[in-house]
Amino acid sequence: MTAFARRHPSINFIFFVVVLLLTMMTEHPAIALLSLLIAVSFALCCVGGKRLLRQLRLIVPLMLLAAILNPLTSKLGETVLFRFPWGSVCTLEAVLYGVFAAIRLAAVLFWFVCWNSVITSDKFLYLFGGAFPSLSLTLCMGLRFVPRLLRRMREVSQTQKCLQPDKRGLRHAGRVVSVTVTWAFESAMDTANSMKSRGYGLRGRTAYSPYRFAAQDAVALAWIVLLGAAALTGRFSGWYAFEFYPTLNGEHGICTVISAACFGVLAAYPLISEGKEALSWRVLR
């Protein structure tokens, strides 16, 4: 668990909401690239190298699709590079916008990888279980369902191969799916009965929570709010606006640099927390 993951769940939630909104709303390639680099670094701290490589198997094809699709479909831009066999033109602006879209998409996906690692199901229930008990429980179960289903499917497949090594093909796949679906239904019924017997969602029900809002959380909240407000001000004031069509044109003044620096420091807050804790541990040793 990283140092940032040990902060109060509300701090984790507010941080990811602000950073994701700024990343998705940005039109400047430098901001998108900065967000991607920080998100990859934080994801490496959260999930490790092996799991991050598995995530790349999904993210890299989506990046390539976004980068290739825009030049194929967009005819905007003044700098013509070449013509496709079907007569449509490929412009430099469309290619660069496709690369920018791929970088922004990858940044958002990597931030969601970090989200899944930091905001666990118990934190999600802590944040929204009181106001929306049914909805929060459904979302938590839905987010956990796909990974658990895939993991159980691999376990069932390996067991079937040990019991019946000669039988492969459609019958083997059908048996694996049947066993996995049966397990999923039984697990859902057990979970529903367990939550009902514990009085989940009843009015006046209380629950133990290990989370306490400490002074360090207050400092982190003030840090996130101030930097987030500065970055949002830059976004809505047009300080890091960038246009790809019809020609490349973007802001690059001192206000742009300050706003980008605020976003970079905000996005790097988990890495700063991790580095500060590692330095403190080294000094104490």
Image: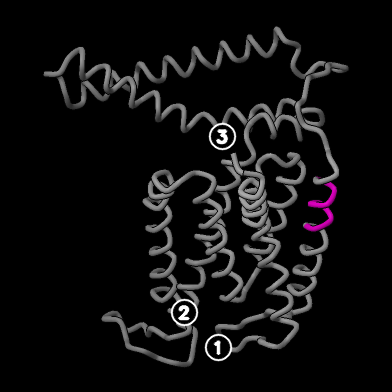
Please report the residue visible at 52 percent of the width from the left and 51 percent of the height from the top: 43
Image position, residue 31 (x, y; %): 61, 72
Report if the CB atoms under discs 2 and 1 are less than 8 Å apart: yes
Location of the N terminus (image quadrant): top right
Decide whether the magenta segment is chiefly helix, strand or loop. helix
* Residue 114 placement, left or right of 137: left
Q: Extreme front residue here?
A: 285
Which three-letter amino acid code belongs to the residue tagged 3?
Leu
In the rendered image of this protein, does residue 250 appear above or below residue 194?
below
Q: Which residue is mark 3?
A: 143
Q: Position of residue 119 (x, y in %)?
A: 64, 39
What secondary structure is marked by label 3?
helix
Residue shown at 43% from the left, 55% from the top: 59
Q: Which mark is residue 248?
A: 1
State which quadrant residue 118 falls in. top right
Give left or right: position of 126 versus 97.
Answer: right
Q: Residue 149 in the image: state x and y as whole percent.
A: 43, 27
Residue lying at the far top in this picture: please name it: 197
The C terminus - image quarter: top right
Disc 2 residue type? Leu
Mark pair 1, 3: CA separation: 40 Å
Residue behind mark 2? 96
